[in-house]
Amino acid sequence: MQYCSTYKELTGSYEHSFKFKLCLRKLALDALSFQNHTARNQEILSTPRVQFLYIHHIFKDEAENFEKIVQYLAEHYTFISHSEAVRRIVENDIDRAYIAWSSDDGIRNNTIAAEILNRYGASCCFYVNPYSIALKDFEAVKRFCKTRLNMPPVEFLSWDDIDILLKQGHEIGNHTHDHSIVSELTLEEFAENFRTAHDILTQQCGVIRHFAYTYGNIEHFNKAAYDFVFQQGYDSCTSAVRGCHINGLETIANSRLFLRRDQIIGNWPLPHIEYFLIQSVKKADFSNNFLPNSYLAQEK
């Protein structure tokens, strides 16, 4: 029985073709980051907006670099909670560059991330799957990680870990019960899955206000599921579609809000982080706050 405990182990488990893609990606980002380096960078990055950043893991060999990332961002941005970020977007109250942190999947090494974020006054919304919380049976862990997370077996948060996160001021969000792909479920199946997760989380954690659908691309979700989330009284529905949020000419009902996030990896060089942030700002538009047109077309 052996859990993956380092980022090096994780990347070492990838197939050769995927490792090759990662190498090409790094080279491309090195080049793009270099080309992107201009005197206007800081002006661009100071654009008032809400930028959601999220992680999946911070292994022990990512911690030092992740702290450098957080320290750098703390010097240039204002960190706010996920709930405050949602409020500022819907109320058109974005007066500076804000960052809100979140984490998906409930991997236990996220406690390392929490410790680092705590040192810089940052809170995080941890989106978890109740099925895997406190899961100890190694074969079940191995199967879940392989089929749902596409990674080697890792330790997951316990309910005691989650209680500590809540006491530290972090938030817990619903990420489906068992990391199912929502677009592959009927609405009835999704409703049962969602409610199962919601009931467990509210019993263990209290009020749950935010949902993030798994895998995060537009094709992994649909309009019917989106509407259902808000019918359950949730404040937000979160994707993994890159982008940021800016003010517009009107306030927004929560039930119209489509949150975008930028994923980062704990060992990424700072120029790579800046590149994605700058690209998000350059593509910023008030329309980013709303559902994609492909979802709206599903109503017709």
Image (cartoon, grey):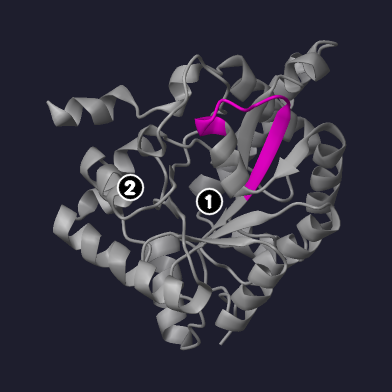
Q: Residues within 10 Å of mark 1 (few under 14, many from 20)?
A: few
**Residue visible at 47% across and 25% down in the picture:** 251
Placement of 179 over or under 218, stated as above or below = below
The residue wearing badge 2 is 230
Residue 92 counted in the magenta span: yes
Q: Secondary structure at mark 1?
A: helix
Residue 253, given in percent of the width and then of the height, sits at: 40, 33
Residue type, label 2 = Phe
Residue 68 counted in the magenta span: no
Chain part drawn in magenta:
89-101
The residue wearing badge 1 is 16
The answer to which quarter of the image holds residue 30 is top right
Placement of 264 over or under 89, stated as above or below = below
Choose between 71 and 170: the one closer to the eye.
170
The residue lying furthest to the left in this view is 300
The answer to which quarter of the image holds residue 60 is bottom right
Q: Is residue 108 visible?
A: yes
The answer to which of marks 1 and 2 sits earlier in the sequence is 1
Q: Real-space Cα distance between discs 1 and 2?
A: 42 Å
The answer to which quarter of the image holds residue 163 is bottom right
